[in-house]
Amino acid sequence: MATSSVSFQFQHPTFQLRQRNAVRTWIQHCVDQEGGAIASLRFLFCDDDHVLQANRQFLEHDYLTDILTFPDHSAQGIAGDIMISVDRTRDNAKHLNTNAIDELHRVIAHGVLHLLGYNDQSPAEQKAMRQREDLWLSKRQF
């Protein structure tokens, strides 16, 4: 599937994703390596308030998170909406003492991995998810 099936939308007032085409290519390459096919991935980069509202409305969770992933099971291939809180990823990067771009890319990979069937409920699943995220980050060529 063409990398144009990966789209980015921006609700956050100060954020712009750099190197969008490179990010699309990276996502496509990693999904290919996982044996998947992209039908449609839509990323929405927003603030904490937007993600918190969606978390309450759709999942009945009353807490902040860095990412919400909403799969579209009607598509052939992986598809869904991935909401990313730019505020959370920036704060997490500071807390983890890591680069903000690396943390943002980790969260992007995390959302796509969920759509590919990876979970992170148990400690073993969390470890496997982190290993896949690390692998994906190592495949960036930008």
Image (cartoon, rainbow, N blue to C red):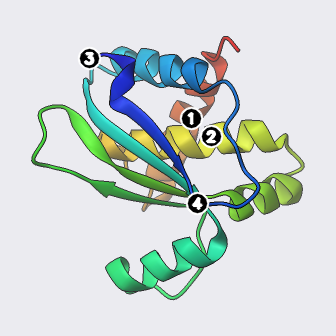
Question: Would you say the residues marked 2 and 1 are in contact, meaning their CB atoms lie under 8 Å apart?
Answer: yes
Q: Which mark is residue 85?
A: none
Question: What's under tag 3, amino acid-wise?
Answer: Met
Mark 1 or 4: the one toward you: 4
Upstream in sequence: badge 2 or badge 3: 3
Q: Give whichever of 2, 38 is nearer the camera.
A: 2
Q: Residue at x 77, y 58 (%)?
A: 92
- Alpha carbon separation for disc pair 1 and 4: 25 Å
Residue indicated by mark 2: 106
Residue 80, percent across and down?
A: 30, 48
Q: Residues within 10 Å of mark 1 (few under 14, many from 20)?
A: many
State how far apart marks 2 and 3 are (Cα).
22 Å
Q: Residue at x 44, y 50 (%)?
A: 125
Determine which residue is flagged by label 3. Answer: 1
Residue wearing tag 1 = 133
Q: Amino acid at mark 4?
A: Gln
Q: Point out the image quarter for the N terminus.
A: top left
Q: Which label's residue is closer to the chain start, 3 or 1?
A: 3
